Amino acid sequence: MSKTPITVAYGDGIGPEIMKATLRVLEAAGARLAPEVIEIGEKVYLAGNNSGIGSAAWESLRRTRVFLKAPITTPQGNGYKSLNVSTRKALGLYANVRPCLAYAPFVPTRHPAMDVVIVRENEEDLYAGIEHRQTDEVYQCLKLITRPGCERIVRYAFEYARRQGRKRVTCFVKDNIMKLTDGLFHRVFDEIGAEYPDIVRDSMIVDIGAARLADTPERFDVIVMPNLYGDILSDVAAQIAGSVGMAGSANIGDQCAMFEAIHGSAPDIAGQDLANPSGLLNGAVQMLLHIGQADVAERVHNAWLRTLEEGLHTADIYREGQSHSRVGTQAFADALIARLGKKPEVLKAVSYTEQAPLVLPTPVRPAPLDKQLVGVDVFLQWRDGTPEQLGPQLQAVAAPDLPLQLITNRGVKVWPQGFPETFCVDHWRCRFTATAGTLCFKEVLALQERLHAQAFDVVKTENLYTFDGAPGYAAVHG
């Protein structure tokens, strides 16, 4: 049978050890692979490439479209980009899928019935990486949530649940505060979820959702989240299931896919044959299913479960009096290879059938809405007095048809009728809104010219629009 080309990166820290163990297991299990090895990570960063990946590596990834990656180390200091984020965004890997399953009683956990899959949006949110320093005291990171991005990840979560025979999909958001961005994610979740009447859907504010996930994960099945929440809570879920070192991760796009462990490169134990290869092995099982080698995935996964059952454990999960033997990285791989063809006797054996990767429809982009300019938020660096002094100065440069409506500091209204107790920094949002309802952009430019003429330091402006008459900006209360 023909072999499937895959791109392999051994990574940094414990990466080479766990990749060696993983590839030995895959070969022994009969995986039909043709690996292409690339260099990424710390060496590439330190050689002057701030993304940690070179052109030859990109060529391999775009050719094979399948990436098995060990953890990498990003050097400390400014200017180095996250290789994971760069890879996910460049290759369109919009869905991060992280199964978090308990293996009690062989791996200690307070939640022996836990079986949760976290589906995390992978490309946008705060991970867009758009940050600015705006004043001496204030830094900004932009949170970008798009309708196409929400539609793709939400539909993926429901399709995944249906294909895997799961019964519930839960959405975690913070739309009581971020009403536009997280509000969009929640709204799309409800719209698309209505198309899947066979699957129960519910939503939670992320803070209480996280608390319940940590306390009673048994109540959850599939959880879909924006990028940042998903990144944090998938690690939490993996850890409370037993160990973050055992969880694998799939990053899925329409054309490419990347598979990895969710843990880092752990340089403190590198080269000591101590690392648990299970996370990367479980990522590799997801890869085998993705490329149509379900028979091999089943053999590897069941042998891995049997190895856990027999108490052959690496240092991170070894427990005196409970585990049978404490083994190193390569000995764990040897033990797993010796059990290929066997199934677990206590833990539930897996049974995989061949399934093509999920192919989702391209989100339909509706006709543009009626977009009208109705005002502008002007952000200033200013530290020459109080809000009561700033307000009249700005009123003096406003125009009758574009008056100053309010001033906020870190989102809190401080003028008019602010509280003297409010602590202010040197960053002020000054909202000007049109009296006639709509505005010509020349009036915005004229306002900025007047502000500059009066020596105001304008660090940013944000136009205020309505879309089919609905405000496209957050209201300020107070």
Image (cartoon, rainbow, N blue to C red):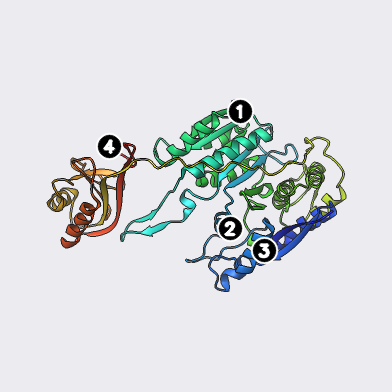
Q: Is residue 276 in view?
A: yes
- Front: mark 4 or 3: 3
Q: How far apart in space, not on screen, are marks 1 and 2 (Cα)?
A: 32 Å
Q: Which mark is residue 199?
A: 1
Q: Which residue is mark 3?
A: 60
Q: Which mark is residue 87?
A: 2
**Of callouts 1 and 3, the N-terminal one:** 3
Q: Is residue 271 in view?
A: no
Q: How far apart in space, not on screen, are marks 1 and 3 (Cα)?
A: 39 Å
Residue at image point 39% right, 38% down: 179
SS of the residue under disc 4: loop
- The image position of residue 386, as x and y in percent, is 18, 51
Residue at image point 55% right, 33% down: 170
| Rendered view: 468 above or below 257 | above
Query: Residue 82 vs residue 270: left or right?
Result: left
Residue 271 sits in quarter: bottom right
